[in-house]
Image (spheres, rainbow, N blue to C red):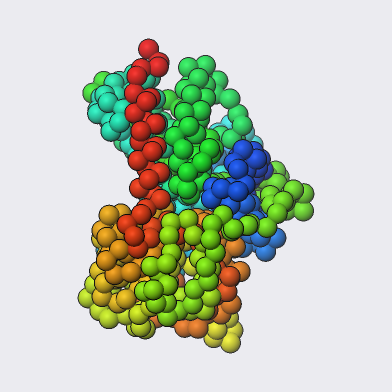
Amino acid sequence: MNLAQLEDSLYSLVVETATNLPADVRATLARAKAREDAATRSGLALATIATNVDMAAESVLPICQDTGMPTFFVHTPVGTNQLEIKAAIKRAIARATQNGKLRPNSVDSLTGENVGDNLGPGTPVIHCEQWERDAIEVKLILKGGGCENKNIQYSLPMELPGLGKANRDLDGVRKCLLHAVHQAQGQGCSAGFIGVAIGGDRTSGYEEAKHQLLRSTDDGNPDPRLAELEAYVMEKANGLGIGTMGFGGDVTLLGCKVGVLNRLPASFFVSVAYNCWAFRRLGVLLDPETGAIQEWQYRVAPREATPMADRAPDFTTGRMVTLKAPITEEQIRALHVGDVVVIEGEMHTGRDAIHKYLMDHEPPVSLQGGVLYHCGPVVRKEADGSYQVLAAGPTTSIREEPYQHEVIRRYGVRAVIGKGGMGAKTLEALQRHGAVYLNAIGGAAQYYAACVKKVTGVDLLQFGIPEAMWHLEVSGFAAIVTMDSHGKSLHADVERTSEERLRELAEPVFR
């Protein structure tokens, strides 16, 4: 086996997966975009997503800044050295990280140190099996942390909010899947996909649920009972009104794939792997002697791709206001849910590590009247010492809920940007101190990176590139007010409405 050729093939797989959305996912998103009213917030989100998909493929840069946990599924002929394949995978991952195709995402769980090359205990994840074919098959899923956090596992029987008792039967599974979509709301970058495993143990169930995500989005389940379940969940989940980004709308779920494993008599697990719209998974068949790529799976070649976007995103879904730091309380009090804010000038990134740091330390720069962006960008250091932002979409904001109210109170932050909304404590702080929450379009990493005109500095780089505080000069950075200083929250409204619709689905369907 020519290891140099194998590594190059695996590197190509990693780059293509991170930057070029698969053909079946593109087709699914195109159908979703056609269903949604273009004049609504969800329609705007889908138009922005389409633009971002095109930008990523053209520039060969990450579709989403969170390039996730690289998870490989490998099949090898009998006699193939799987250790050599694993070693080549790791070299390809480190190379892609160095070249800005992957964000450094591997963090030491005890020290919090980002190792910088996406290698370490448990990363990347590699599943190897033998098969009876001559070729080597390698499939890769890049599943970001935001949607990974919305994975959920149920142990039946149990009571589910809004749906009542879920028994150990197919109807109990039905209730679990509806609940799984509802609990994700917009925090997993809806519209999304779910892979499902009925049965197994806690570990094998989650693995099989992710394995279901390897199915083509338009395939049919060979088991008629599961085919009926998949169709039912697609229909009813899209009737919950959660919509893209949780903005409300007709498109909430893009795919539902269900598999079954045998189980122990004492256990009945239902495992759900939630995946965002940026459904990055590709596969290759490799020559077992040379490691050269023989065939791509799921892929559409960039030169053959039909552009996703038929128009530029139109953010005029509400009143448009331009803000530039330092922002005054008067400017914030004039904003209401539904307004579109365009940021010009200075903003600062800050996510998990920064928020925890700010509980015990003063910020390295003044945040008074400032804009704080929940973002872990992909950043490359250039030869002259400057930095270039390669991808810069929002991260899921709810993780900062334990800290955000204090950060607003102590440091005078006026605008917080993220995705998926925040909770009651943050809403109270917005109202009390005169601040606003702006929802950017999740996963639109290239769209927002284009708004970054300059990196003016960086602090706390010891936390790693995603967790450092980056100081950015931006222009035309548009996001929607979804939580205002008057106590209104679009996220709370959508969750309340969708819960009412969920309750209407409590009666048994599958007997």
Relative to 153, say whether 430 is above or below.
below
Q: Position of residue 405 (x, y in %)?
A: 27, 65
- Quarter-wise, where is residue 353 in the image? bottom left
At a point 58% along the width and 52% down the height, the residue shown is 44
Q: Position of residue 466 (x, y in %)?
A: 43, 68
Which residue is the extreme one toward the top?
Answer: 511
Count of labels in the image:
0
At a point 47% along the width and 43% down the height, the residue shown is 248
At a point 51% along the width and 46% down the height, the residue shown is 244
- Residue closest to the eye, 498 or 305: 498
Q: Is residue 484 left or right of residue 312?
A: left
- Residue closest to the eye, 237 or 323: 323
Relative to 252, say whether 304 is above or below.
below
Q: Position of residue 79 (x, y in %)?
A: 55, 40
Which residue is the extreme one toward the right?
Answer: 304
Residue 190 visible in the snapshot: no
Residue 259 visible in the snapshot: yes
- Residue closest to the eye, 244 or 80: 244
At a point 36% along the width and 74% down the height, the residue shown is 329
Q: Position of residue 178 (x, y in %)?
A: 40, 31
Relative to 290, say whether 406 is above or below.
below
For the C terminus, the image quarter is top left
